[in-house]
Amino acid sequence: MNDELEGIRKRKMQELIAKVSRSKLKVAVPTYAGGLDDSICEHFGRAPTFTIVDLETGDVEVLQNYSEHFGGSKLPPELLSEKGVSVVLCRGLGPRALAMFQQFGIEVYVGASGTVSDALREFQAGILREASEKDICREHRHSFF
């Protein structure tokens, strides 16, 4: 079973690498203040910022979360989609956010911990897993990985 899961992870990573050759790969991580050394915010939708890293250029952008959670009119998946994000790395997230990311064609990987740099290393090493219905946070009770 573990060999099968490892094969699936490798195939998904190859698909993602193929996607990189067709378009820029921007990765977003929910953070408290932003930056590569910032900690991952555990409550995705209420993260004060999102750190966006362009893996092609190495550019880092900090996006303030001005979603409806903070008085705005949009939701975090909409904000990140508008910034060209293609992958989100997080600890976990709710069902509505996961569904919206899927609608926008943005892949979500869960189980990230530590800093943004840690999450990027885990992602590139294939350690994080693609989010599914079993990974979602229900009623603000976060599952721990």
Image (tube, rainbow, N blue to C red):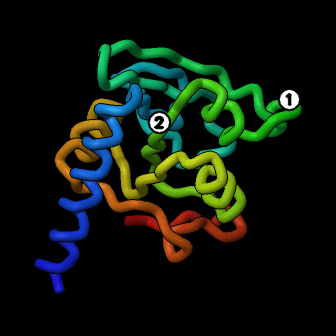
Percent x, y for residue 96?
71, 59
Relative to 83, does residue 106 appear above or below in the rendering?
Answer: below
Of label 2 and label 1, which has the lower sequence position?
Answer: 2
Crowding at dot 2, Cα within 10 Å, few <14 / some 14-19 / many 20+, comes out as many
Tag 2 and tag 1, C-beta contact below 8 Å: no
Amino acid type assigned to the residue bearing label 1 in the image: Gly
Q: Residue under circle 2?
A: 29
Task: Classify the position of the N terminus by image quarter.
Answer: bottom left
Identify the residue shown where x is 62% and y is 34%. Answer: 81
Q: Quadrant of residue 22?
A: top left
Identify the residue shown where x is 40% and y is 26%. Answer: 24
Q: Quadrant of residue 18?
A: top left
Name the one closer to the observer, 106 or 95.
106
Cα distance, mark 2 to mark 1?
20 Å
Left or right, 41 with reference to 101 = left
Percent x, y for residue 10?
18, 60
Q: Residue pushed farthest bottom?
A: 1
Relative to 97, does residue 80 appear above or below in the rendering?
Answer: above
- Numbered disc 1: secondary structure: loop
Percent x, y for residue 105?
56, 48
Percent x, y for residue 83?
59, 24
Left or right, 3 with reference to 5 = left
Q: Residue under circle 1?
A: 72
Q: Residue pushed farthest front?
A: 22
Amino acid type assigned to the residue bearing label 2 in the image: Val
Label for residue 20? none
Identify the residue shown where x is 52% and y is 40%. Answer: 41
Crowding at dot 1, Cα within 10 Å, few <14 / some 14-19 / many 20+, comes out as few
- Numbered disc 2: secondary structure: strand
Identify the residue shown where x is 68% and y is 53%. Answer: 100
Name the one closer to the observer, 11 or 97.
11
